Image (cartoon, helix red, strand yellow):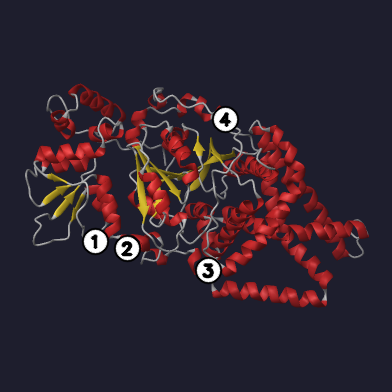
């Protein structure tokens, strides 16, 4: 398929003081007509409705707009919503902006209306609902909050994939199938039995069997080293898209107990260089997180940000919250930021340009995550090295070869429709990011690299790092099990190359992480007793050759990938932590064994990582904010 054009909004101009009808009434409520005309001109240029522009720009608040609307029509405005009837498609109701109230004999009100800016508002005005006693006007934010409250149970079930549609999807919720359990326990029992009878032969046989898988994992990493790094696309004029061609962008920010970084988060979101009227930022807060809700209520947020309270329910996870945001998203594009993130202000612009100039099969872009506090401790330094290798070498290399990757948990950019086709995120998977990337590939899409950075905070203390890493590895195990529930279907949908890459990245990494100490110990023993270089049998010869080959290539991959990533990031001073990587990988193995324990005893438990604890910042103070006034001509018409 060829490049696409985003559908543009109908601005619906109507002659009333030279103003569109949907904002003309504001002139009677103290808003200068000259400012309204300027907002109307700007809305036409960037392709949004005038009503959206006047609210998003801060010219009028949402409450002032709907109070004035109600007064102009002779309707009653309420700050507090009346009780609403439950049921129906909540997303559709929000798009139309009209909900039925719970009828009471003493109350004539039958409908609560809050037509969102744009076509719904124009349709409402065209209906001329003057002085009706059965209608009360709310703000869209108030209507949405009350609808979520009235339909909390239904929304919680849908977001948790325990409704009828959700139960049809494969999910980490079901755990291992009986076939997988029989195979797993049978294999473990068989190896344990023959290990008692012939331990050396069992070790050699296991190593030879797993050898190809480990080689595939290593080869992927080494192959990524030879791929050329992508250029900085922002400096190429063809990626600089005019505001009028940019689509509406939904930004989901799921947070829980993040008071320590809340001000930083709001500042980072406010700095995003994107037309305010085309931003739909949703800060997702769990209903039970009372402290954070109170803190947010005391903050003044930009008009394009809204706090979405996620109805209580199980599992209380990030992907469940994201599913709620996806159901209500206004944007044609959708991205996720975590609480501690500081994205490049231009990231949404670059992602939108990349999607606009690509075929519809491009369904996801992964931006590059950069650790901002590598100087806090040796752990955060090794973490920074690891991320440099992953996001500047391995992921771009795999994606340039048309292979899938394991997405990071933030700064993924999606086509909203592609997400809805697969039902969103698996709410029972504690690494929903790794899972959804392969779901999108299996649905016929592909992923690409977005050479744009997001700053992140790494844990600098061992307990916090272990908690985070064991959750990640448990989630990778969940992802492996759920996608292998039907191996034939995985191969059919993803194709051979993508399925093999999936096994190498997930299964190979998991087994390699778990057996890393065993491999190190047996290699050391074999060196000291001479058997590694002087094998006594053909089987030992094969094992020695395999061990030497894996050791050599594995060491190259383990050190060269992060070293090259640090160099590409201009952070060669991180090389001082390269000697610590073997200890870092041993700790990762410990986290892997703890993850196995967690999978058995607390499969859906979420080890929350605390943020706001960084003691240093390498990049944040040097970041140059984008200039919102800088706009570029769209060169597409000349191509």
Q: Position of residue 214 (x, y in %)?
A: 71, 56
- Residue 161: quadrant of the picture: bottom left
Q: Residues within 10 Å of mark 4 (few under 14, many from 20)?
A: few
Q: Which mark is residue 175?
A: 3
What residue is disc 4 on? Answer: 231
Q: Residues within 10 Å of mark 2 (few under 14, many from 20)?
A: some
Q: Residues within 10 Å of mark 1 (few under 14, many from 20)?
A: many
Do labels 1 and 3 touch, CB within 8 Å?
no
Mark sitting earlier along the chain (1/3) = 1
> Quadrant of the image for the C terminus?
top left
Question: Mark 3 falls on what kind of element?
Answer: loop
What residue is disc 1 on? Answer: 86
Do labels 3 and 2 touch, CB within 8 Å?
no
What residue is disc 2 on? Answer: 154
Closer to the eye: label 1 or 3:
1
Closer to the eye: label 4 or 1:
1
- Total residue callouts: 4
Q: Is 29 on the left-hand or right-hand side of 228?
A: left
Rounded to the nearest angstrom, the CA distance separating label 1 from label 2 is 9 Å
Closer to the eye: label 4 or 3:
3
Rounded to the nearest angstrom, the CA distance separating label 4 from label 1 is 52 Å
Mark sitting earlier along the chain (1/2) = 1
Question: Mark 1 falls on what kind of element?
Answer: loop
Mark sitting earlier along the chain (4/1) = 1
Q: Residues within 10 Å of mark 3 (few under 14, many from 20)?
A: some
Mark sitting earlier along the chain (3/2) = 2
């Amino acid at each position: 398929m060829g490049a696409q054009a985003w559908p543009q909004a109908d601005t619906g101009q109507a002659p009333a003081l030279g103003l569109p009808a949907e904002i003309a009434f504001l002139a009677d409520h103290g808003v200068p007509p000259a400012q309204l005309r300027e907002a109307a001109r700007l809305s036409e240029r960037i392709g949004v409705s005038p009503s959206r522009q006047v609210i998003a720009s801060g010219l009028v608040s949402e409450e002032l707009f709907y109070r004035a609307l109600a007064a102009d029509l002779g309707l009653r405005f309420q700050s507090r919503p009346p009780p609403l009837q439950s049921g129906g498609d909540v997303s559709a109701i929000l798009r139309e902006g009209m909900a039925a109230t719970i009828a009471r004999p003493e109350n004539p009100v039958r409908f609560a209306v809050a037509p969102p800016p744009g076509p719904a508002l124009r349709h409402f005005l065209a209906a001329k609902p003057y002085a009706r006693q059965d209608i009360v006007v709310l703000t869209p934010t108030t209507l949405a909050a009350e609808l979520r409250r009235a339909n909390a149970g239904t929304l919680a079930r849908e977001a948790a994939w325990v409704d009828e549609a959700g139960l049809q999807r494969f999910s980490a919720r079901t755990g291992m199938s009986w076939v997988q359990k029989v195979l797993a326990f049978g294999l473990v029992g068989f190896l344990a039995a023959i290990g008692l009878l012939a331990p050396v032969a069992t070790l050699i046989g296991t190593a030879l069997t797993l050898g190809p898988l480990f080689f595939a994992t290593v080869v992927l990493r080494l192959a990524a080293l030879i791929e050329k790094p992508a250029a900085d696309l922002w400096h190429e004029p063809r990626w600089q898209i005019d505001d009028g061609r940019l689509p509406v962008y939904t930004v989901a920010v799921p947070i829980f107990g993040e008071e320590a970084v809340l001000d930083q988060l709001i500042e980072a979101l406010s700095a995003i260089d994107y037309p305010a009227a085309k931003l739909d930022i949703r800060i997702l807060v769990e209903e039970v997180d009372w402290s954070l809700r109170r803190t947010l209520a005391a903050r003044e947020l930009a008009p394009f940000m809204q706090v979405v309270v996620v109805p209580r329910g199980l599992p209380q996870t990030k992907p469940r919250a994201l599913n709620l945001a996806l159901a209500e998203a206004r944007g044609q594009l959708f991205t996720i930021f975590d609480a501690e993130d500081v994205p490049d202000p231009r990231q949404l612009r670059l992602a939108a340009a990349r999607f606009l100039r690509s075929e519809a099969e491009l369904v996801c872009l992964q931006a590059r995550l950069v650790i901002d506090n590598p100087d806090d401790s040796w752990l955060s330094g090794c973490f920074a090295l690891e991320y440099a290798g992953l996001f500047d070498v391995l992921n771009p290399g795999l994606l340039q070869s048309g292979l899938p990757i394991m997405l990071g948990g933030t700064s993924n950019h999606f086509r909203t429709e592609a997400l809805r086709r697969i039902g969103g995120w698996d709410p029972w998977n504690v690494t929903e990011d790794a899972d959804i990337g392969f779901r999108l590939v299996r649905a016929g899409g592909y992923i690409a690299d977005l050479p744009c950075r997001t700053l992140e905070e790494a844990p600098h203390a061992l307990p916090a790092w272990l908690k985070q890493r064991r959750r990640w590895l448990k989630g990778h195990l969940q992802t492996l099990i759920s996608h292998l529930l039907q191996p034939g279907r995985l191969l059919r949908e993803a194709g051979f190359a993508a399925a093999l890459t999936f096994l190498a990245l997930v299964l190979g990494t998991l087994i390699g992480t778990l057996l890393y100490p065993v491999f190190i110990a047996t290699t050391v023993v074999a060196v000291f007793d001479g058997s590694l270089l002087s094998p006594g049998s053909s089987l030992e010869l094969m094992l020695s050759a395999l061990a030497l080959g894996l050791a050599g290539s594995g060491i190259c991959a383990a050190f060269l990938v992060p070293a090259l990533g640090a160099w590409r990031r201009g952070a060669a001073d991180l090389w001082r932590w390269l000697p610590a990587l073997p200890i870092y990988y041993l700790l990762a193995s410990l986290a892997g064994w703890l993850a196995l324990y967690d999978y058995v005893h607390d499969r859906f438990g979420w080890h929350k990582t605390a943020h706001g604890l960084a003691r240093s910042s390498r990049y944040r103070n040097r970041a140059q904010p984008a200039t919102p006034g800088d706009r570029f001509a769209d060169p597409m018409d000349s191509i």
